[in-house]
């Protein structure tokens, strides 16, 4: 078996994630959720902005520099958040260390614990005891899916190490964009979906809750483009009424 095909080592959770109580574990869930949700929000805003810019070039041209750097900011923030989610640093909170902490704290996952943590939730009474217990085999697969043996995570971490968190001196010296570590849109989408699935799978088991990845007001950007487009159309109509052959 080659080195790349070797089974991941069963690592212990970071020291800071060992022997935590349920209040501390709840804080870990919320902390990881911040990065997962931020990655989705900024990637969603980037996707929507690119769609509007492509569909309405006359509108985007009115403030192209602003929209360009807004796209850059959304992309960088989304990828930075996603890189934290699938980080591999031994002492940090990320998806893999979080799942390893779950493996070491299975005693926190039971219906009685959920009832204690969410005493006013009427749906807890309808839960089966099994719904609150992670399946060890599934959990092991999920931990493995968060290692750099996965090609998407490997690509994300290479991108982070050479272009996002650090600028690789060797690659920069070569001054060849084609040699930069590739990170495909399809890979980012798969990792976003995996992060959402894993977070909500174990958040539900811990306290019967889940996280939305779409913020209130997600479509506000469309309203801005609509408003600019109406103003442009009005100016064009006024120019035509005044007999001006072209509208700049």
Image (tube, grey):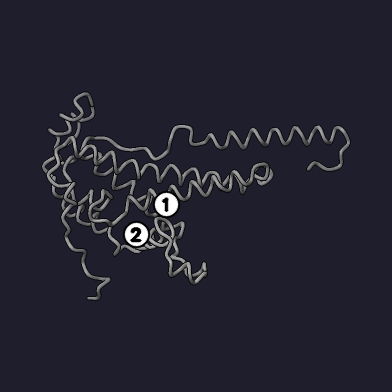
For marks 1 and 2, give the CA distance: 12 Å
Q: Callout 1: helix, strand or loop? A: helix
Residue at image coords 57%, 37% = 222
Q: Is residue 67 left or right of residue 99?
A: right
x, y percent for residue 129: 14, 38
Counting residues from the start of the chain, the first of labels 1 and 2 encountered is: 1
* Disc 1 and disc 2 in contact, CB within 8 angstroms: no
**Residue on which disc 2 sits:** 153
Q: Is residue 224 left or right of residue 187?
A: right
For label 2, the crowd category at 10 Å Cα-Cα, with few meaning under 14, some 14 to 19 and many 20 or more, is many
Residue 49 picture quarter: top right
The N terminus sits in image quarter: bottom left
Residue lying farthest right? 243
Residue at image coords 24%, 43% = 202
For label 1, the crowd category at 10 Å Cα-Cα, with few meaning under 14, some 14 to 19 and many 20 or more, is many
- In the image, is residue 16 above or below residue 24? below
Q: Callout 2: helix, strand or loop? A: helix
x, y percent for residue 89: 27, 56
Residue 212 is marked as none
Front-most of 153 and 145?
A: 153
Q: Is residue 102 visible?
A: no
Front-most of 162 and 199?
A: 162
- In the image, is residue 237 above or below residue 171? above
x, y percent for residue 68: 58, 48
x, y percent for residue 246: 83, 43
Q: Is residue 99 visible?
A: yes
**Residue on which disc 1 sits:** 79
The C terminus sits in image quarter: top right
């Amino acid at each position: 078996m080659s080195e790349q095909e070797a089974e991941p080592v069963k690592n212990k959770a970071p020291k800071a994630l060992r022997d935590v109580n349920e209040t501390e574990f709840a804080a870990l869930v919320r902390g990881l959720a911040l990065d997962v949700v931020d990655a989705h929000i900024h990637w969603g805003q980037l996707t929507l902005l690119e769609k509007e810019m492509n569909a309405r070039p006359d509108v985007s041209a009115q403030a192209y520099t602003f929209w360009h750097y807004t796209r850059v900011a959304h992309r960088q923030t989304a990828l930075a958040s996603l890189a934290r989610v699938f980080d591999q640093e031994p002492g940090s909170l990320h998806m893999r260390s979080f799942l390893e902490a779950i493996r070491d704290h299975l005693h926190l996952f039971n219906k009685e614990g959920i009832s204690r943590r969410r005493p006013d939730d009427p749906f807890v009474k309808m839960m089966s005891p099994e719904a609150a217990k992670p399946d060890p085999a599934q959990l092991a697969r999920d931990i493995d899916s968060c290692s750099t043996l996965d090609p998407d995570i490997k690509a994300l971490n290479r991108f982070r190490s050479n272009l996002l968190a650090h600028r690789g001196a060797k690659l920069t010296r070569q001054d060849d964009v084609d040699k930069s570590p590739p990170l495909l849109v399809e890979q980012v989408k798969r990792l976003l979906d995996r992060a959402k699935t894993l977070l909500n799978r174990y958040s539900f088991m811990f306290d019967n809750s889940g996280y939305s990845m779409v913020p209130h007001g997600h479509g506000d950007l469309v309203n801005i483009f609509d408003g600019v487009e109406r103003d442009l159309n009005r100016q064009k109509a006024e120019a035509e009424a005044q007999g001006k052959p072209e509208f700049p």
